Image (cartoon, helix red, strand yellow):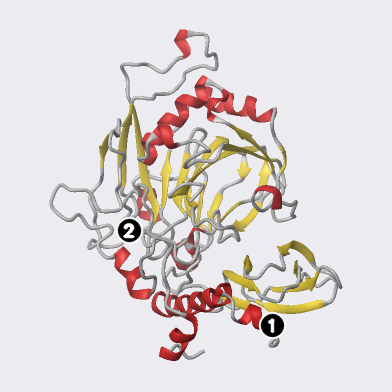
Amino acid sequence: PVFDSAYDIQYGEGIGVDGEPFHLDAVRSRSDGAETCPVRGAHPPIVQLPKDYPARLTLAPSRKYTPARTLDDLHAEGRLPFAEYVLPEHDGKTKSVGGAVAVKVINFTRKNLDEMWDDGSRDGIYSGDLPAGLGSRTVLMTYAGHAFKFVDSDTKQLYRRIVMKDDVHFIIFEPDPNDAAALNSKKYAAAKREMKFMLNYYEHYGYPWLARYGRPAPVLNMWPASHLGQTHTVESQYGHWVCDDVDNPLCRPPVSEPLLVNLTVASHAPSGPRVFVIENLMSDAECDHIRTMGEAVIGDSTVGNGAKGFKSSSRTSSTGWLPRAKSQILETMQRRFADVLGIAENRLTTKELAEDLQVVRYERGQQYNPHHDFADGSDAGYGQRFLTLLLYVEVPEKGGATSFPKAYNGKGLKVKPPRGGAVLFYSMLPDGNGDDLSLHGGNVVYAGEKWACNLWIWDPDRHS
């Protein structure tokens, strides 16, 4: 389409959910200076600590203008030995073509459509549904060259087959030309405004806008990541439990010994997602506690959120949920996590920012294919997953790393922290967009078992 004044007159100009103008220039301004200290001694604007932040924080300075370092440089210093490139032979300078893509599909056909991944079989593999409601949407997380078939749920007739392309991220299934109600609807005009923004954003940045159209910049704390190996230190009063017995005073965390937690940058923009590795977030006793409780709650994993979740060959693990109030040990750990994330601990509840702790077990041969933790869903809210704190409870003997295939311009990053360690990565960029580079997966376990936990934090909260 030609985005001229006539287009704006027909479909209107973009307004965000906060009532402010929403267009490329407005969104670009959100990132300007986001990670630059305004005055000496001040935190960058992305650092948004709660008013009564109880931990002691030491932020490492930025080194944007020093020579770029590599994981090999850190390994030579004995640092991050459990972080490696997925493709060591890749030059890391040119982005891979034919890689993973995310595509928003908006439905105005008034047809209930089944979304089928075309694996070459007659029917394909069911991957979700696209309801008939005007403006219902789905996001395809797939790879360039893969194809999806959208099939009428009622007649079983093929409506459309789409082959994924690297530079296509927004598709409207258009209304019938005689459907005046759909063509003149506010939802259709909104989709046309969104299409204009999507194309302008991609043309400027070279990557798509994947968040909900119109959402504001994040309000939660985000740790700076300017260079590989940059290390921030958090001193938390919520230390490690030393044994798994809440009734034994000797098992409780030492009151007089704060816990020092280091967050080390393993990847950063613009060549990769914002990823930190934490080596000592949990004690062995806490890992034992999670595994014991997890064994009582796990069941088959599903793909998707809530009632729309379904089993898929792309995710072959077992999962369950552990509320923080389940035990005193989990409560202490959640308070420590809040310090490490720079978020008020009383907001780490399902009523505000957090989901319950998801516990996951991967047995031999199981994996989770690359995916994003955020989604542009079809509900009315604009809150989305902001960060993931991935805890390593049991480390398998072979395999089981967490991989980020788009990191380092396609060279990829895989991380496998020691037991009690964690990977912190952000699913959102400072301008409010979902970070396409945060695509990640759980690699195949070849020997032993992998037990892990996901703590997902939403911005601005779960119910906005």
Residue 181: give x, y in percent of width and height. 65, 79
**Mark 1 crowdedness (10 Å alpha carbons): few <14, some 14-19, many ≥20:** few
Residue 150: give x, y in percent of width and height. 75, 73
**Label 2 or label 1, whichever comes before in sequence order:** 2
Residue 389: give x, y in percent of width and height. 48, 43
Which sits in the foreground, 350 or 297? 350
Q: The disc labelled 2 sits on which kind of residue? A: Arg
Residue 341: give x, y in percent of width and height. 39, 41
Which sits in the foreground, 415 or 253? 253
Residue under circle 1? 179
Relative horizontal placement of residue 380, taking residue 313 as reference (left or right): left
Q: Residue at x 23, y 61 (%)?
A: 66
Which sits in the foreground, 68 or 376? 376
Res. 320 image quadrant: top right
Examine the rendering and report whether any part of residue 443 can be seen: yes
Residue under circle 2? 69
Q: Secondary structure at mark 2?
A: loop
For marks 2 and 1, give the CA distance: 57 Å
Q: Secondary structure at mark 1?
A: loop
Q: Nearer the viewer, mark 2 or mark 1?
A: 1
Res. 33 image quadrant: bottom left
Examine the rendering and report whether any part of residue 173 can be seen: no
Q: Residue at x 62, y 35 (%)?
A: 321
Above or below, 152 relative to 183 = above
**Mark 2 crowdedness (10 Å alpha carbons): few <14, some 14-19, many ≥20:** few
Q: Residue at x 40, y 65 (%)?
A: 271
